[in-house]
Amino acid sequence: MIVGGGTGGTALLPILHEYPEIQVVGVADIRDDAPGLQLAKKLGIPTANRYCTLLEQVEVDIVVDVSGCRSVSEDLCARMARKPVELIEGLSANLLFKLIDERRTREREALNRLKEQEALYKIGIMLTSSESEDKLLSTILDCATNLTHTPAGTIALYDDTEGCMELVATRGFSEKILHQNSWGIRGGGLTEYILNENAVITIKNLEEFKRVPVDKLLKEGVRSLIATPLVADRRIIGILYVDDFVPRDFSAKEESILSLLATQAAIAIGKMQLYEKMKRLATTDGLTGLCNHRNFVKALRKELKRSRRYGHQLSVIILDVDHFKHYNDTNGHLKGNMALKKLTATMKNAIRSMDVLARYGGEEFAIILPETDREQALNMAARMCQAVEQEEFPGEEKQPQNTLTISAGVATFPADAETEEELLEKADSALYLAKHAGRNQAVLYQDE
């Protein structure tokens, strides 16, 4: 379905209508005299002045918004969020329009250009339907090497936290290149050169290229390449490379196609990264990076099921920072957050790789200890209390015990409880006993 029957919609409609595998199910425009609406009526395609009315009347998989209206865009985004429908709008719609417009120009110039434009259109559909980052990157690299007829290629993404590039996808290279999976952006290097140019870079013969060192690529057998930065919303996403193992003159058409693909790819990768970030935020605590309460309970349920199946014991520790309200009131919440981060690092160092550490509440933490009995769990909790007591925290001398400490309660399946609710309740009961026994200690659950 096309929203907008002006210049963009009028240009898109006849081209999309030509494809037998695509069915244009409707065109909407507020103006009755819009040329796109008149053309749709001639082609027997449903029309409406209100796109929301048309959406209720037809089944649609993709909505292309070329209305150029911000309020329409915002409303469509809200509607599409509740439906399994792809929305192409804004920069993506402009890009789609430019690609199709270029295709029409190429048709007039030469019939053999048609295949490249069809490929680019299909790539756009493929990129928007990729379900994972790995699949998305693989699709981009396959398309890039196929469209430029190159035997090899790579994608490197920029890690803004570390300030380095990370190799995330390769084609046509030996496995040894994967061992050099990250590198810094050094002054006078090829990466900096590509990013500074902010355009497609073509090197016809690396052996004759003298602007920056390319020794590592020469060792891999690369003799020519095209590289283009991946940029979305003025943010560097990474670099897309296609490579050949012989010197080669790349055509202007190949450079242009790769540039168009890079624009689509950068937008798709940026959206995928945002999606992955939101998924991580949904399962992790934003301050400490540990799994959150909801994810912890889910993990505990899974581990309990496994323990029942194989007859293993499983222990849970619930820990609480002693007098943490006093620490926050005395030192401020900023130092309080810093203390929680340092506390997290201390506890991570004390647990095993198989254990699950989570932020259970404000200043409460919890640990799942698979295949661990009561005494082993108590020893682990006691060592953790000791490790925290020995760690230095800013402002801890103002605490009631002159140091920042934690208390811990321990409960074990099946000795103390059969379900995750009972296990957590009894570990919390043991924590209560540890608090009333003087804090800075670990206590086992005991039946009253």
Image (cartoon, rainbow, N blue to C red):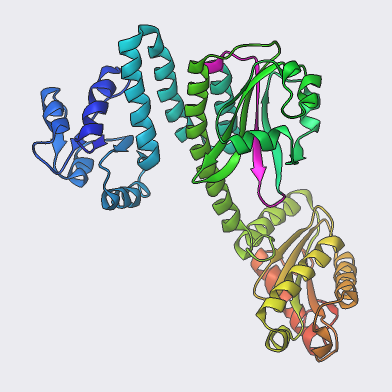
Q: Nearer the viewer, residue 372 or 53?
A: 53
Horizontal side, residue 90 vs residue 212: left or right? left
Residue 445 in sight: no
List x then y, in percent, for residue 387: 89, 72
Q: Residue furthest bottom?
A: 400
Q: Is residue 246 magenta?
A: no
Horizontal side, residue 237 vs residue 443: left or right? left
> Residue at the location (71% across, 13% down)?
245
Horizontal side, residue 272 vs residue 437: left or right? left
> Residue at the location (56% across, 22% down)?
144
Count of numbered circles in the view? 0
> Residue at the location (68% across, 60% down)?
289
Up/down of 175 relative to 47, above or below: above
> Residue at the location (69% across, 35% down)?
191
Q: Which residues are magenta?
A: 146-162
- State the quadrant of the N terminus: top left
Q: Nearer the viewer, residue 89 or 164?
A: 164
List x then y, in percent, for residue 305: 69, 53
Residue 274 in sight: yes
Up/down of 234 relative to 221, above or below: below
- State the quadrant of the C terminus: bottom right
Up/down of 412 relative to 407, above or below: above
List x then y, in percent, for residue 223: 72, 16
